[in-house]
Image (tube, rainbow, N blue to C red):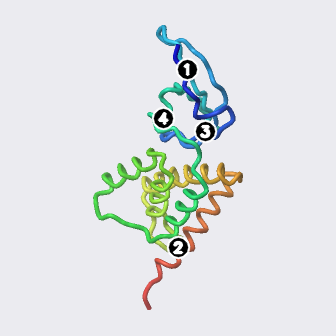
């Protein structure tokens, strides 16, 4: 008989599920589905009040991963300090690209979306859909930052917005 596959995540671990963000492994479950014995990670996403079951053998395939390392979090914060890249393509195309980056689960891609869609108080107003995507990306980034730094999500969001405002002050200077 083959050895049982080694589990990547343990009960209590925080994990990132690309489409839903940061969740916590609350249980390992054995279940029989369609006559097949399956081992499942049971993930809890508090913010969405959602529970998700992921077969242990599919976790990597769907992109489920451990929280980002401190180094990756630092890289993401550095991305926030950069100059926003504004593409001149149609909004619908940009919106799709932004959504794809958010759902990739890649922290640096999410940071790019947050940086590119941030609007300081002295900048032109955002459309409703721009604001929605910005808030989704900022929330996703804040949740992972909060879990990595063991702070709460609102504190993480304040930290992100402070970095963005400081960067906006540099890049939005109007020549005299």
- Report the residue marked by disc 3: 23
How far apart are the alpha carbons under marks 3 and 2?
Answer: 30 Å
3D distance between C-alphas at marks 2 and 4: 35 Å
Q: Secondary structure at mark 1?
A: loop
**Residue in the picture at 52% in, 69% down:** 81
**Looking at this view, is 46 or 81 the one in front?**
81
Identify the residue under disc 1. Answer: 3
Q: Which circle, 3 or 2, is nearer the viewer?
A: 3
Q: Residue drawn at (47%, 77%), measured in percent from left and top?
A: 171
Distance between mark 4 and mark 3 Cα atoms: 15 Å
Label 1 crowding class (10 Å Cα cut-off): few <14, some 14-19, many 20+? few
Image quadrant in which the C terminus is located: bottom left
State the CA–CA distance, disc 3 to disc 1: 28 Å
Q: In x, y percent, where is residue 175?
A: 43, 88
**Which callout, 1 or 4, points to the residue nearer the camera?**
1
Q: Are the two marked residues, 1 and 4, in contact with CB atoms closer than 8 angstroms?
A: no
Circle 4 — which element? loop
Earlier in the chain: of badge 3 and badge 2, it is 3
Q: Nearer the viewer, mark 2 or mark 4?
A: 4
Q: Which residue is mark 4?
A: 60
Disc 2: which residue: 167
């Amino acid at each position: 008989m083959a050895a049982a596959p080694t589990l990547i995540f343990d009960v209590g671990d925080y994990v990132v599920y690309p489409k839903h963000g940061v969740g916590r492994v609350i249980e390992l479950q054995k279940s029989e589905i369609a006559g097949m014995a399956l081992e499942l990670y049971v993930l809890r996403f508090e913010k969405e009040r959602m529970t998700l079951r992921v077969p242990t053998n599919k976790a990597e395939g769907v992109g489920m991963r451990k929280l980002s390392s401190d180094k990756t979090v630092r890289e993401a914060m550095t991305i926030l300090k950069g100059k926003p890249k504004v593409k001149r393509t149609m909004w619908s195309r940009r919106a799709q690209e932004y959504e794809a980056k958010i759902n990739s689960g890649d922290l640096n891609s999410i940071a790019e979306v947050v940086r590119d869609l941030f609007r300081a108080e002295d900048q032109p107003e955002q459309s409703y859909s721009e604001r929605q995507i910005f808030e989704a990306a900022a929330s996703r980034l804040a949740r992972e930052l909060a879990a990595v730094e063991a702070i709460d999500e609102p504190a993480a969001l304040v930290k992100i917005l402070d970095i963005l405002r400081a960067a906006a002050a540099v890049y939005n200077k109007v020549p005299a």
